Image (cartoon, helix red, strand yellow):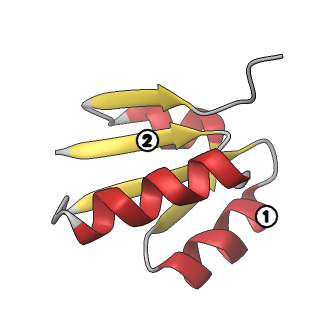
């Protein structure tokens, strides 16, 4: 399953991406407004990175990971 995490460069998104990767999800994609930022974080975490619209394009599940204020 391909899981896209919008807001994936923040603390909640990073934590979720790590847990999904460790749980064996085969495709975890970090989404961000800036592709370079998404890719840098994704490289650090061992997942994929893309700009938000590209991240959700082929996703089976989309998670919006943002702070609830």
Q: In which quarter of the image is the C terminus?
A: top right
**Depicted 19 relative to depicted 7: above or below:** below
Q: Which of 8 and 32 is in front in this view?
A: 8
Q: What residue lies at 43% left-to-right and 66% top-to-bottom? A: 18
Quarter location, residue 50: bottom right
Residue 39 position by quadrant: bottom right
SS at circle 1: helix
- For disc 2, the marked residue is 4
30 w.r.t. 53: above or below: below
- The quarter of the image holding the N terminus is top left
Check residue 7 in the rendering and tell me which mark sits there, or answer none: none
Image check: 66 left or right of 33? left
Give the residue furthest to the front. Answer: 69
Does residue 3 lie above or below 26 as drawn?
above
For marks 2 and 1, the one nearer the N-term is 2
Residue under the point 79% across and 42% down = 33
Extreme residue in the top direction: 69
**Would you say the residues marked 2 and 1 are in contact, meaning their CB atoms lie under 8 Å apart?**
no
As measured in the structure, the alpha-carbon distance from the residue carrying label 2 to the one carrying label 1 is 15 Å
Q: What element carries label 2?
A: strand
On screen, residue 35 versus residue 29, left or right, reads right
* Residue 16 position within the rendered picture, expressed as x and y whole percent measured from the top left: 46, 51
> Is 67 or 31 nearer to us in this picture?
67
Q: Position of residue 44 (x, y in %)?
A: 60, 83
Residue positioned 79% across, 64% down in the render: 37
Which residue is disc 1 drawn over?
37
Category of crowding for the residue at label 1, using alpha-carbon neighbours closer than 10 angstroms: few (below 14), some (14–19), many (at least 20)? some
């Amino acid at each position: 399953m391909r899981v896209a995490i919008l807001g994936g460069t923040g603390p909640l998104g990073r934590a979720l991406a790590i847990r999904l990767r460790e749980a064996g999800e085969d495709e975890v994609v970090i989404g961000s407004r800036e592709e370079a930022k998404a890719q840098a974080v994704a490289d650090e975490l061992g997942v994929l990175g893309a700009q938000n619209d590209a991240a959700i394009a082929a996703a089976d599940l989309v998670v919006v990971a943002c702070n609830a204020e």
